[in-house]
Amino acid sequence: MVIFGIYYAVPLIAAGALVTWLLSWHWAVPFYILAGFCLYFFRDPNRTIPDGPVAVAPADGKVVAILPDQAGASRVSIFLNIFDVHVNRTPIGGKIACVKYQKGQFLVASKEAASHSNEQNILTVDGDGSRVVFKQIAGLIARRIVCYKRPGDIVEKGERIGLIKFGSRVDVFLGPEWTVTVREGERVSAGSSIIARRTA
């Protein structure tokens, strides 16, 4: 994922160098600042994946909603601000049963309406008798969702599956066999933070 940072940073550094040559280094400072931010934004730190029958956070960010449904399932929503790591990871290991892209709006990702109205990529993973669905959801600034996985791919828990550029949201749908272990307002890290435990 670091390659995206280089992709954006190199033209900005080149522009800064050109402005320095034509005018002065003072005028080039904003280009260098933006280049540094792009390298920072697309960072991709390694994570320690926990063992056992647990589901891990698919994204870094703040838990903004935990909502049950009538069937006993739960939805955990994580909001990523522009300073969070934006690399997404799969909550459980298994086989990717479905990847579905859905066009939509670009509402503020922290709002409830973004869960169903915004542009999103929906992944379904079947593993160890459980099915977990999670959505990469674009936000107000994020205008591109990247996903490297396809139906039929086998993934390990916490494996990188893609990213969303510049502010976004990820929703995770867990069946009744899972007990959610995080709380609203809690911050989580993709791949290393446990969001639910398998109880059935």
Image (cartoon, rainbow, N blue to C red):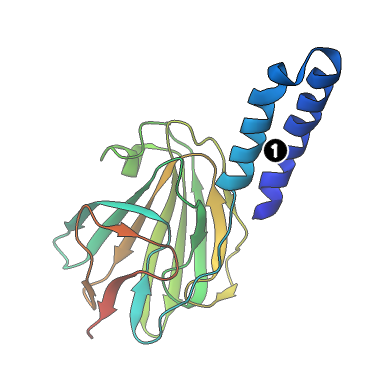
How many numbered tags mark residues here? Answer: 1
Above or below residue 180? Residue 156 is below
Q: Nearer the viewer, residue 89 or 174?
A: 89
Q: Is residue 30 left or right of residue 183?
A: right
Residue at 67% x, 25% y is: 29
Q: Tag 1, which secondary structure?
A: helix
Q: Quadrant of residue 154?
A: bottom right
The residue under label 1 is: 8
Q: Please identify the residue farthest to the right as the structure is shown.
A: 21
Residue 139 pos. (x, y %) = 42, 37
The quadrant the C terminus occupies is bottom left
Q: Nearer the viewer, residue 37 or 182?
A: 37
Residue at 43% x, 43% y is: 168
Q: Quadrant of residue 180?
A: bottom left
Above or below residue 139? Residue 23 is above
Q: Please identify the residue farthest to the top as the structure is shown.
A: 23
Residue 84 pos. (x, y %) = 45, 49
Above or below residue 23? Residue 185 is below
Residue at 76% x, 33% y is: 13
Other residues around mark 1 within 10 Å, as few (<14) / some (14–19) / many (≥20): some
Above or below residue 67? Residue 32 is above
The quadrant the N terminus occupies is bottom right
Residue at 40% x, 37% y is: 118
Residue 106 pos. (x, y %) = 43, 31
Q: Quadrant of residue 71?
A: bottom left
- Amino acid under disc 1: Tyr
Residue 178 pos. (x, y %) = 24, 75
Q: Is residue 180 left or right of residue 46?
A: left
Q: Nearer the viewer, residue 63 or 9?
A: 9
